[in-house]
Image: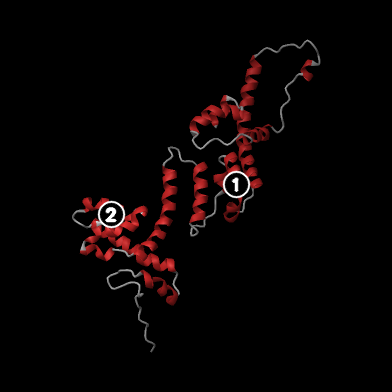
Amino acid sequence: MAMQKKKTRPKSISSNGKICGSTLKKDCSHSGENFEELLHKTVLKRVHGFRIFVQGFPKQREWFAQTVHFIQPNNYQDNITVPVLDNNECHTFSLKNEEWEQASHIIEMLNSLSAATELLCGSEYPTLNSALPIYLILIKRLTSLKKHIYICAMIIDPQFKMHFWKSQLRSIEQHCSQSLNEIKSIFFTEARKFYITTQVDMEIQTNNQHQNKPKKHSLNQFDDELFCVVEKLNELEEKIARYLQQDVEPKETKILAYWLTFRRKLFQTSPQSLGAI
C-alpha cells in the first residue's frame, strides 16, 4: 500500500507565518510553482492577517490612521518603524526589506485598479466615452484580465468611438474581431430605424399643415417643376457623415450641456425628432 506523501511547508514560510524573502524564489524553483502564486500565498496572507488583527484590537480607531499609513505605496519602506509594528503581538506581521519589494509589486497592480476606479467615480455623469478607453488601458496593465469588448458600446457615439478605434487599433484587434466598417454598418442600421419612424411622423404633420393652407397659383407653368424642393435620397447618410467630421470635443466638455446646445446644429432636425433624441 503506497504511503501518502506528506505536505511540507515552503522554507520561505516559517511556523509563525513569517516570510523569508531570500528563500522565496528558491522555493519556487524547486517546487515549480509560479512566483506570483507563492507571493499571493505569503505576502497577501500576511497583510490580510494584519488587517484582521487591527480590526479586532481594542484601540481600533486610534490604530486606523497608522494602518492606512502602513499600506500607502509611497511610505512602505518607512513602515518598518511604524509604532504599531513595534508591538510584540504585531511582530508576526512585520516585513523585511526583501518582502517590502515583493509587496510593492502587489501595490503597483492595485494602483492600476484604484486609478481606473477614481477616474470613473470622479465623473458626475460617467459614460462609455470615458469608461471604454479606461477599460482598454487597464487591459494593457493587467494581463490577467482578458475580456472581449462588446460592440454595443461602440454604437452609442460613433464619432468618438471611431476616433479612438483608429488611435488604439493594435490593442483593439487583440480583443475584438469587428471591423470599423461593420461597426459603421450597425450604426446606420439602427439609425435608419429611428429615422424612418421620425420621418413618417413629420410627413403626417406636414401633410396636415398643407391641407389647411390654400394653394398658391404659380405665375409660370414651369415654376412648380423648376423651383420645387428635391428630396435627398441619402439624407440620413449625409447627416451622419457631417456629424462624424466634427472635431472631437475637449475632455472638460459637459456632456449634457453640449448636447443641449449643439444637437440642433449637428443634426439639423425638427423639434419633434429632437424630442425623441
Around disc 2, counting alpha carbons within 10 Å, would you say few (fewer than 14), some (14 to 19), or many (20 or more)? many
Whole-angstrom CA distance, mark 1 to mark 2, is 42 Å
The quadrant where residue 92 appears: bottom left
Q: Which residue is mark 1?
A: 167
How many numbered discs sit on the rendered protein?
2
176 with respect to 9 (left or right): right
Q: Amino acid at mark 2?
A: Thr
Q: Quadrant of the N terminus?
A: bottom left
Q: Amino acid at mark 1?
A: Ser
* Image point (42%, 67%), residue name: 37
SS for tag 2? Answer: helix
Locate residue 274, reporting x and y percent. 56, 28
145 with respect to 14 (left or right): right
Locate residue 189, reporting x and y percent. 63, 41
Locate residue 195, reporting x and y percent. 62, 33
Position of residue 192 relative to residue 211, above or below, is below
Q: Are marks 1 and 2 in contact (CB under 8 Å)?
A: no
Around disc 1, counting alpha carbons within 10 Å, would you say few (fewer than 14), some (14 to 19), or many (20 or more)? few
Q: Which residue is mark 2?
A: 67
Locate residue 42, reporting x and y percent. 35, 67
